[in-house]
Image (tube, rainbow, N blue to C red):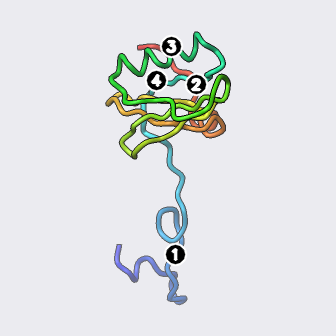
Amino acid sequence: MTRAAGRRQGKGLPLLRPGYGMPALYRLKVPGVEAMQWLPGDLIQAGGMAGWLMVNAADFHHPGGMGDETTLAIQTAAGEQTAKPGDWVIRTFPGGFFVIPQAIFELVCVPGEPT
């Protein structure tokens, strides 16, 4: 589109449209991820998380806290991220791990079907 074509006739101002001069809506292209919630007070869930991370060769450790307050640090493509109790750890199908707070996880993720 030429500069003139993007202007209102006679006004000399560019037309505002999504992606040009104003935000556009997007959806994530991620077809599916594996996810587990970090619940350190639940020993079965915490053990399952540790096993899942080890099977997938994740670099992780517990930097602090005890019992229900234990945090979990995971090395990700964006650097080390720390999961607090209640946060979600996701694994994308290329194999990368990320930590997402529970409030954001609930906004962007819905349960999927096993493949």
SS at mark 4 in the image: strand
Name the quadrant containing residue 4. bottom left
Q: Position of residue 113 (x, y in %)?
A: 49, 16
In the structure shown, which secondary structural element does the residue marked by tag 1 occupy? loop
Label of residue 48 in the image: 3
Q: Position of residue 39 (x, y in %)?
A: 62, 22
Q: CA distance from mark 3 to mark 1?
A: 54 Å
- Type of the residue with mark 4: Glu
Tell whether label 1 touches label 2 (CB within 8 Å).
no
Image label count: 4
Q: Position of residue 85 (x, y in %)?
A: 63, 30
Name the residue rendered at 36%, 16% in the picture. 55
Q: Label 2 sits on what residue type?
A: Gln
Give x and y (percent) for residue 60.
42, 30
Residue named by callout 4? 34
Mark 3 vs mark 4, foreground winner is 3
Estimate the spatial distance between the alpha carbons at disc 4 and disc 2, rounded to whole Å. 11 Å
Q: Residue at x 47, y 18 (%)?
A: 50
Label placed on residue 15: 1
* Disc assigned to residue 88: none
Marks 3 and 2, how far apart in space? 10 Å
In primary-sequence order, the first of circles 2 and 1 is 1
Looking at the image, is mark 4 or mark 2 nearer the viewer? 2
Q: Establish if 89 lies above or below 80.
A: above
- Give whichever of discs 3 and 2 has the lower sequence position: 2
Circles 3 and 4: CB atoms closer than 8 Å:
no
Measure the alpha-carbon separation of dots 4 and 1.
42 Å
Identify which residue is drawn at 51% across, 30% down: 62
Say which of marks 2 and 1 sits in front.
2
Q: Secondary structure at mark 2?
A: strand
65 relative to 76 in the view: left or right:
right
Which residue is label 2 attached to?
37
